[in-house]
């Protein structure tokens, strides 16, 4: 498997500015194409949210205002794209080719979850911004749509991250199907990384996992790795895992997403939710 096509949904926020500036050097290193996706909501969708008793004129004014604000956000995002394209000297290519690193801009109107579902299933990997710490990750529609509806790996980038992704990779291994999928998706990155560390996670609800088995598997792909163990309840595994990533100076964490009940983790918390809310480094996840 190679990384040849990356989906990059962006908006007009500061988080997207850092996201696109992180994604483009990554794509260049793999000679990949980046489809930059901007989703423009239909202003008429706000009508059901307006209060009862409002006149037709008031509703039309609200729709008009929403449309103007939407256009401003679109123009800001497109300007960001144009600036990064010029700075990176990247070719704009809309049709599939073998021409190496390239990009193109996609404007779609509609619901964010529906559009991301459709485009993400035909990408090798999806780049997304980490939600702000003040935002509840459990209600982030974009991230959960990509994780659960795409069948693809999702690479989440914190807004504070400013290095190259994938040189120093940490793998969180608990023996789950989701972890195996994440590792499989990360193989192209692991092959060119400077080092790989496997952190085997053990707790009362984890599946039986041995870091040595994964080390042997990676060896068949020509990838060397070192192994470490983390033990404890799910409540402490998240903090311990991120502490290990920091101590090892990792710039990418690879892990399965929601390896236990999604509803339980969203309501009560869990390793996936903790990592998404607190990580300072990019995380590649798969479900």
Image (cartoon, rainbow, N blue to C red):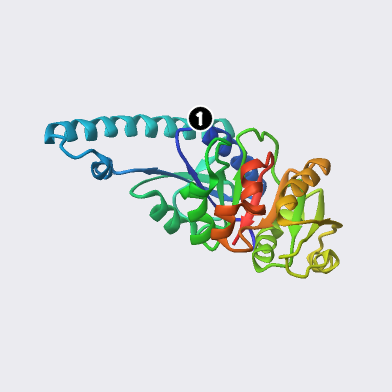
**In the figure, residue 270 lies in which quadrant?**
bottom right
**Front residue of this view, candidates 26 and 230:** 230
Whole-percent x and y of residue 171? 75, 55
The residue sitting at the left extreme is: 56
Q: Quadrant of the N terminus?
A: bottom right
Q: Is residue 75 left or right of residue 1?
A: left
Q: Residue 5: in sight, yes or no?
A: no
Q: Is residue 15 left or right of residue 285?
A: left
Whole-percent x and y of residue 99? 56, 51
**In the figure, residue 118 lies in which quadrant?**
bottom left
Residue at 56 percent across and 36 percent down: it is: 132
Whole-percent x and y of residue 95? 45, 53
Judging by the rendered image, the residue that carries numbered circle 1 is 83
Whole-percent x and y of residue 237? 74, 52
**Front residue of this view, candidates 183 and 107:** 183
Q: Residue 47: in sight, yes or no?
A: yes
């Amino acid at each position: 498997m190679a990384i040849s096509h990356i989906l990059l949904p962006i908006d007009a926020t500061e988080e997207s500015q850092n996201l696109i500036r992180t994604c483009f050097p990554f794509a260049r290193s793999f000679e990949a194409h980046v489809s930059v996706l901007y989703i423009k909501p239909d202003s008429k969708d706000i009508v059901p949210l307006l209060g009862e008793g409002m006149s037709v004129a008031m509703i039309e004014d609200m729709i008009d205002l929403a449309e103007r604000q939407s256009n401003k956000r679109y123009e800001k995002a497109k300007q960001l794209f144009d600036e990064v394209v010029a700075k990176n000297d990247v070719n704009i290519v809309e049709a599939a080719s073998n021409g190496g690193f390239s990009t193109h801009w996609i404007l779609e109107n509609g619901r964010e979850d529906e559009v991301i579902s459709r485009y993400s299933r035909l990408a090798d990997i999806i780049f997304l911004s980490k939600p702000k710490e003040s935002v509840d990750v459990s209600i982030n529609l974009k991230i959960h749509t990509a994780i659960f509806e795409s069948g693809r790996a999702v690479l989440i980038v914190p807004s504070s991250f400013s290095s190259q992704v994938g040189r120093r990779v940490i793998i969180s291994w608990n023996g789950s199907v989701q972890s195996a999928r994440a590792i499989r998706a990360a193989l192209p990155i692991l092959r060119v990384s400077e080092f790989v560390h496997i952190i085997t996670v053990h707790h009362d609800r984890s599946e039986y996992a041995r870091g040595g088995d994964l080390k042997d598997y990676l060896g068949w792909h020509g990838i060397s790795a070192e192994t470490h163990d983390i033990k404890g309840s799910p409540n402490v595994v998240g903090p311990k895992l991120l502490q290990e990533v920091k101590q090892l100076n990792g710039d990418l964490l690879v892990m399965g997403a929601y390896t236990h009940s999604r509803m339980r983790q969203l309501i009560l918390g869990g390793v996936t939710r903790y990592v998404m809310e607190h990580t300072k480094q990019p995380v590649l996840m798969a479900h």
